Image (cartoon, rainbow, N blue to C red):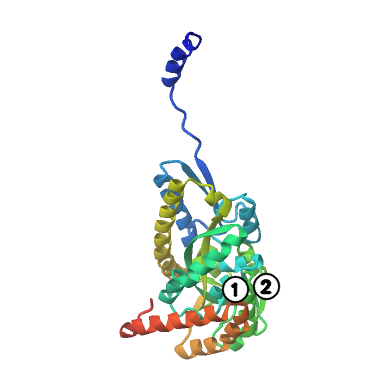
Amino acid sequence: MKSLAFLFPLLAALALLPVQAAEPLVIKFSHALSPATPKGKAADKFKELAERYSDGAVKVEVHPNGQLYQDREEMTALRLGAVQMLAPSFAQFGPLGLREFEVFDLPYIFPNKATLHRVMDGDIGTRLMARLEAKGIKGLAYWDNGFKQMSANRPLIRVEDFKGLKLRIQSSRVIDAQMRTLGGMPQVIPLSEVRTRLTEGAVDGTENTLSNFHSQKLYEVQKHLTLSDHGYLGYAVIVNKAFWEGLKPDLRAQLEKAMKEATVYERRIAQEENDAALEQIRAAGAIQIHVLSNEERRIWQQTLLPVHEQFADVLGRDTIHAIYRIAAEVAREQKPRSGKRQ
């Protein structure tokens, strides 16, 4: 014991030294959109909440506008661990062999947000997220952008108006088939290049949400915008599975709480942002806005319905018919309030 006596003063001195805080765990959250979009704002909200709830144990670095990776690259980066979190559109799961997510791309399958969210938050959404795990990915939440509209340098009112137009799309066989069914010629172009390609005339038109039309200033380089609500654009918030499972349970719970609250916030502002974007586009006066009549919309729907059957075996016939049933349930529930869009 005498030989160890000299250690006691040393240990006492060490105990008086300030304890250096551990370095925070860094989560890189990459996405391709502007910070001003619903996705961008929700990513920043998640950062705020995650850092607060973890008491600084986590630092979330949000990289917008494709600063780190473009759409085509980011999924590989996530799986390799170069980034920890993404919020890709559903079409990006197709190249991983997860084509079922493209059910969200089917034209006119969701008549309203109520149907959409019931699908996302129910058995179908849960089952799709579970499919990610075999690919080394963990699904955390579904985020909205909104319903998509059509634009071109000529009015798009009748189906015949699409004939021969080169139309920008994201990489999706479903959206490719949608445009071909309308008579257009789809071209896959990254979102960051769309405005330039439209300006150059490399493509004639595109589809997107009002929020993206505004944030990307696409309304400045197109003459006509049709409010068609023909399709939906949303995102799955995902994380590298090995990274997620390596977190301490209490930290994981804090991040789950932050994501849940960020998702409620995101879905609320998505509708607000799209409504505001429409008013701002109108106020700019640079593009003519067309609203489809009920009969014109019915013809679009009738024309595009065969796309559902075309992909039924790939996306899941049972899934498609389950969505039809959910849409019918929502319609019955909303019948007393008919005329109000949800």
Question: Are circles 1 and 2 on residues that touch, CB within 8 Å?
Answer: no
* Circle 2 residue: 187
Farthest residue in the left direction? 336
Residue at point 44%, 54% (across, down): 256
Residue at point 43%, 24% (across, down): 18
Q: Is residue 62 above or below residue 20?
A: below
Most foreground residue, 67 or 122: 122
Most foreground residue, 102 or 43: 102
Looking at the rendered structure, the number of numbered marks drawn on it comes to: 2
> For mark 1, does the 10 Å Cα neighbourhood hold few (<14), some (14 to 19), or many (20 or more) residues?
many
Is residue 158 something one can see in this rendering? yes
* Circle 1 residue: 206
Residue at point 65%, 82% (across, down): 180
Q: Position of residue 159 (x, y in %)?
A: 58, 87
Farthest residue in the top direction? 2
Q: In the rendered structure, find residue 184 and report the number of the disc placed on it.
A: none
Q: Is residue 287 above or below residue 329?
A: above
Most foreground residue, 197 or 70: 70
Is residue 222 something one can see in this rendering? no
Q: Which SS class for mark 1?
A: strand
Tag 2: amino acid? Gln
Residue at point 44%, 27% (across, down): 19
Mark 1 to mark 2 CA distance (whole Å):
9 Å
Image position of 97 (left or right of 217): right
Q: Position of residue 171 (x, y in %)?
A: 64, 69
Q: Earlier in the sequence, mark 1 or mark 2?
A: 2
Q: Which SS class for mark 2?
A: strand
